[in-house]
């Protein structure tokens, strides 16, 4: 595509088109005709002085205003705009010159225009009135003077070109200035190492949060983080490693906060998080939990696994400060107190908040520690088939060997584990340990039995249980049919995701048991659709056998219903001969309870496995175990 200057001649007289073409390309034509003479001259007199001839114009013509405007439009779209238009004032039957020029400028303000007129339909004043006072409008009187046409063409196209260049240059300059300003602005408000907002942006954000909080009446808090013993990393590894740690921490913190919240780096190993729109303490604890998890996994830096802890000080607006200076200062003070108290902990600026939350956070920290210190262990409670009088399964039940408080039972820590999300790693540990144990028994040559593992709603919600179970079965080599999962019936109702997960688990060959059956809201309909293998009658009914006739009926009804749906029924919490007799009479298929055995450690299970038909043995063993 040529870069020639483009000129359009809009005139209803084709002869005029030719005139323009001739005038504006004249010297080129002459040159062409006399090429051989020029060549001879050059031979004799040498290269002539360069003569400023006409620039290379590309000339287009149109016989009507409308046609001309269309051509201008097309040229614009193609990115090859016209620089100059010669427009005849009278072009019947279509638009006259004035009308045409208006349209031209609607499309492109920069086109230079020369009105060509033999006599004036419009005076200059009228033209100005119509088109406005412009510096790209000139008048050319007919008949033309060739020189005047050439001068106009040269001057106006040059003017157009210069204006265009100037405009481009200015916009490039503006762009550069804009880019630089943005960059400077970013650099002034961000930390170079971690790319997090710095103090400047943080202060602005706190000010905004204060305004927002005043409007919506919600709290917000400022959390001051300081990494514990960070200096050690710098000194013992290198500053470079230290930098890597800071970047890694920044990245994890950033992924743990909500979109609206902010994490900033103040410098060194100090970070600040602003948590906005907090409705209540529950909200707050949940968010803090998420932040704590950030430091659970070690950081892999330069081939070292570095375990980091942090001390955190918290100030809550408006209680702990009404402006950003106070809030930051008080969060900082609280952080120092946390450090004094031995690091790796939280400290609220307000004592009252401290007391309430600290206990709970402490408990969570303990749970977390329990997992990494392997303080959990499993007991197994036998389950017998009544018809064959055989040990068929054991239920894995978790216990916590607390370093100072002794053994803690699941009811005292599973709810907290669920709330804090720790149930996920704990649950995975239970699954793995139980499957491994069962496989170990089978490998030792005992008769194969099932192992039952309790799973909670959170475990379904927080991760893909199917993947985890598949991974663990694969890892331990236990066949799926020897694993059963106990879900409480309330877990399942009305949650389509959970129901789908159950179907997937069932497809893998795992047995599904509805635990504590009778306490939830199961309807017959949904039981029919769920791929359940067994119902486990809740122990509260079993324990009321003989004392509450209503419960007797419920048990009978559950058994009858299970049979009609082709499900097995297990009664849990069997404690007496009477209860056992009742269950036998009503054809309950399996039993579990203190009458046979309490939950026992795996070594004692082996005694049972050696003699699986001896139900009395369980009773004997019971004497040797926990209460
Ligand atoms: P659950 O699944 O209904 O487990 C049965 C509970 O009843 C066990 O308490 C067991 O020791 C107790 N039990 C068994 N037979 C009798 C009896 O004859 N009489 C009486 N009074 N109690 C009996 P435990 O071990 O304290 O577990 C309590 C609950 O904690 C379990 O109820 C289960 O929901 C949960 N749990 C236990 N281990 C785990 C676990 O690994 N993961 C999860 N998510 N939950 C668990
Ligand atoms: Mg259970
Ligand atoms: Mg139960």
Image (tube, grey):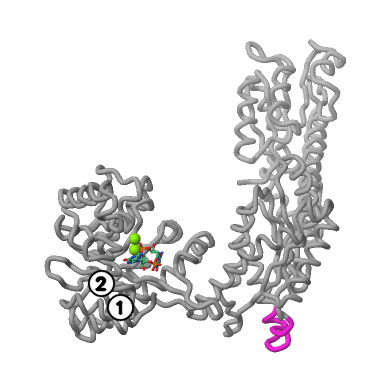
Residue 456 sits in quarter: bottom left
Q: CA distance from mark 2 to mark 1?
A: 8 Å
Q: In the rendered structure, which disc, 2 or 1, sits on the residue that comes first in sequence?
A: 2
Q: Which residue is mark 2?
A: 596
Left or right: 165 in relation to 557: right
Q: Are marks 2 and 1 in contact (CB under 8 Å)?
A: yes
The residue depicted at 65 percent of the width and 40 percent of the height is 80
Q: Quadrant of ligand 2?
A: bottom left
Relative image position of residue 76 (x, y in whole percent)? 64, 36
Q: Main secondary structure of the magenta part?
A: helix
When the figure is inspected, residue 65 is found, relative to residue 167, above or below; the finding is above
State the quadrant of the C terminus.
bottom left
Image point (82%, 23%), residue name: 139
Q: Residue furthest toward the left?
A: 388
Q: Vertically, is 573 above or below 14?
A: below
Pick the residue in front: 357 or 150: 357
Q: Which residues are magenta?
A: 231-242
Q: Is mark 2 within 8 Å of ligand 1?
A: no
Question: Dividing the picture into quarters, in which one does residue 403 lie?
Answer: bottom right
Residue 602 in the image, given as x and y percentages of width and height: 32, 81
As for residue 83 lying within the magenta part, the answer is no
The 10 Å Cα crowd at callout 2, few under 14, some 14 to 19, many 20 or more, is many
Q: Which element type, helix, strand or loop, lies under badge 2?
A: loop
């Amino acid at each position: 595509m040529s870069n020639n200057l483009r000129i359009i001649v809009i005139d209803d007289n084709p002869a005029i088109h030719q005139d323009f073409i001739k005038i504006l390309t004249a010297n080129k034509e002459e040159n062409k005709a006399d090429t051989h003479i020029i060549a001879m001259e050059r031979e004799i007199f040498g290269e002539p002085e360069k003569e400023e001839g006409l620039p290379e114009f590309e000339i287009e013509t149109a016989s009507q205003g409308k046609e001309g405007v269309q051509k201008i439009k097309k040229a614009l779209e193609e990115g090859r705009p016209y620089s100059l238009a010669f427009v005849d004032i009278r072009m019947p039957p279509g638009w006259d010159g004035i009308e045409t020029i208006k349209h031209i400028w609607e499309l492109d303000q920069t086109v230079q225009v020369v009105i060509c007129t033999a006599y004036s339909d419009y005076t200059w004043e009228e033209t100005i009135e119509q088109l406005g006072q412009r510096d790209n409008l000139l008048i050319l009187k007919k008949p033309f003077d060739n020189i005047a046409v050439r001068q106009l063409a040269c001057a106006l196209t040059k003017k157009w070109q210069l204006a265009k260049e100037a405009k481009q240059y200015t916009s490039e300059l503006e762009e550069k200035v804009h880019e630089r300003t943005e960059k400077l602005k970013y650099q002034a408000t961000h930390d170079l190492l971690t790319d997090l907002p710095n103090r400047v942006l943080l202060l602005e954000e706190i000010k905004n949060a204060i305004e927002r909080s005043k409007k919506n009446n919600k709290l917000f808090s400022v959390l001051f983080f300081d990494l514990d013993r960070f200096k050690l990393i710098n000194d013992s590894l290198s500053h470079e490693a230290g930098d890597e740690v800071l970047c890694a921490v920044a990245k994890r913190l950033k992924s743990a906060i909500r979109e609206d919240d902010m994490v900033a780096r103040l410098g060194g190993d100090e970070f600040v998080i602003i948590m906005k729109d907090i409705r209540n303490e529950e909200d707050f604890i949940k968010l803090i939990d998420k932040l704590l998890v950030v430091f659970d996994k070690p950081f892999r830096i330069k081939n070292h696994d570095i375990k980091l802890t942090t001390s955190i000080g918290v100030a809550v607006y408006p209680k702990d400060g009404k402006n950003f200076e106070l809030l930051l200062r008080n969060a900082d003070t609280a952080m120092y107190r946390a450090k004094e108290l031995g690091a790796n902990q939280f400290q609220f600026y307000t004592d009252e908040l401290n007391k309430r939350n600290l206990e709970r956070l402490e408990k969570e920290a303990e749970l977390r520690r329990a997992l990494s210190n392997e303080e959990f262990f499993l007991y197994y409670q036998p389950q017998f088939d009544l018809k064959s009088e055989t040990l068929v399964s054991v239920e894995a039940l978790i216990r916590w060997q607390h370093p100072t408080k002794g053994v803690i039972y699941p009811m005292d820590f599973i709810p907290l584990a669920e709330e804090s999300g720790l149930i996920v790693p704990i649950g995975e540990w239970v699954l793995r340990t139980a499957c491994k144990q069962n496989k170990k028994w089978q490998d030792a040559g005992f008769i194969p039995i099932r192992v039952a593992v309790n799973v909670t709603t959170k475990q379904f919600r927080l991760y893909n249980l199917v993947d985890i179970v598949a991974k663990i079965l694969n890892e331990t080599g236990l066949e799926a049919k020897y694993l059963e999962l106990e879900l409480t019936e309330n877990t399942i109702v009305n949650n389509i995701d959970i129901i789908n997960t159950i179907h997937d688990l069932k497809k893998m060959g795992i047995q599904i048991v509805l635990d504590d059956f009778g306490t939830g809201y199961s309807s017959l309909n949904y039981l029919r659709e769920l791929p359940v293998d067994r119902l486990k009658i809740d122990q509260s009914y079993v324990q009321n056998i003989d004392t509450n006739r209503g419960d007797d009926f419920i048990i009978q009804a559950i058994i009858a219903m299970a049979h009609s749906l082709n499900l097995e029924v297990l009664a849990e919490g069997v404690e007496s001969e009477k209860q056992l007799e009742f269950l036998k009479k009503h054809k309950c298929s399996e039993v579990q309870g203190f009458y046979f055995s309490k939950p026992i450690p795996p070594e004692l299970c082996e005694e049972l496995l050696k003699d699986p038909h001896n139900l009395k043995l369980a009773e004997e063993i019971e004497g040797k175990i926990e209460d």
